[in-house]
Amino acid sequence: MTNAIVMSGIRPTGFLHLGNYFGAVRNYVRMQDQFTCYFMVADLHSLTTHPDTKELKGHVARVLAENIACGLDPEKVALYCQSHVRETTELYLYLNMLAYTGELEKTTTFKDKVRLQPENINAGLLTYPVLQTADIILHRATLVPVGKDQEQHLEMARNFVKRFNHRYGEVFPEPQAFNFGEELVKVPSLDGSGKMSKSENQNATIYLSDEDDLIRKKLMKAKTDAGPTAPETPKPDYIENLFQLMRLVSAEDVVKKFDEDYDQCRIRYGDMKKQLGEDMVKFITPIREKAESIRTNPVYLKEVMEKGAEKARKSAEETMQIVREAMGLKYY
Ligand code: TRP
């Protein structure tokens, strides 16, 4: 255990998939034994794009349940909801005074959202990176496990921190993106195009909530061809993708067998997909079942959220005492 503080936010947009598992959650689970960790469900951030909150409660329950089922331990980490720690919004307000509209308007994610939801370009969308900075520095965290798409937000967070420290004194350390391993594991989508993702082709993405038969069906439909005709032919992308998935969930000797079959031009993709289907089912079933039992247990979820918020508030209150003092907001 080092003293380093880890913080990350998870958007409550429902349904984790295999890409989230290998790309993010597995990293969180490894970190929980080595660092002081704060993992937060970003429910306030979700209001910038989803003002209708009818389904929010269900999404929050699902995202908590799925992360716990993947191995995140609410006893070891602070697992909490953003809206339960009001200090977040106070710090967000202070940071807003240090953020320039010009730099916010230039943010890639803001420009994307402007294109995606031209009817609702709200100020919360513009200051999204400011709120994210508040989440992180509220715990004076330095390590932030996030994907590539969040690097610009972290760079902005460092700028806000520098500006704050310059104006009010050294209060915050500079946070940086952090992940185990040199490269983040990318889980390929089943249609041979890009990564597994929530929004794109649902049949090309395996969700942790998919039932056994649906998993088998999705894998059987994955793109293949008639197989190589000469030994040692390089694998086309969509075949390499199947091997990549197999490396994630199958035993080493199984992968080796199909690799050799490929090189000897005797591979039968039907057999390979069947094997992959069974190994995937074995991998997902226990996670899905555990998640389902947690998701439908409101008493347990309440306990988790209360305990998480309590830990997060303790750290937040300490930071905010220092912040108010540094900012000259203490009059007696
Ligand atoms: N913006 C992040 C995302 O889209 C979610 C997030 C909110 C976050 N607050 C955070 C990530 C703080 C890291 C740290 O995935």
Image (spheres, helix red, strand yellow):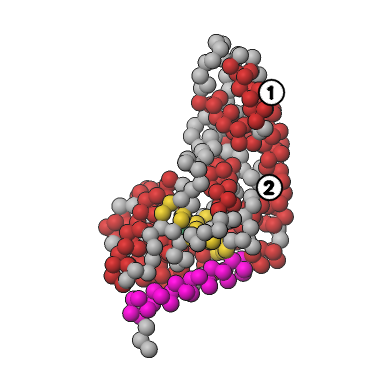
x then y, percent, for residue 18: 59, 42
In terms of secondary structure, what is the magenta stretch mainly?
helix
Compared to residue 245, the image places residue 124 above or below, namely below
Query: Depth check: 278 or 171 in front?
Result: 171
Q: Can you say which quadrant of the picture contains the N terminus? A: bottom right
Residue drawn at 37 percent across, 79 percent down:
325
Residue at disc 1, secondary structure: helix
**Range of magenta residues:** 305-329
User: Of callouts 2 and 1, which one flags the residue occurring earlier in the amino acid sequence?
Assistant: 1
Whether the magenta-drawn stretch holds residue 317 is answered as: yes
Compared to residue 230, the image places residue 46 above or below, namely below
Amino acid found under the numbered disc labelled 2: Ile
Residue on which disc 1 sits = 271
Is residue 114 among what the camera can see? no
Query: Badge 1, how many Cα within 10 Å: few under 14, some, many 20+?
Result: few
Q: CA distance from mark 2 to mark 1?
A: 25 Å
Mark on residue 287?
Answer: 2
Residue drawn at 43 percent across, 77 percent down:
321
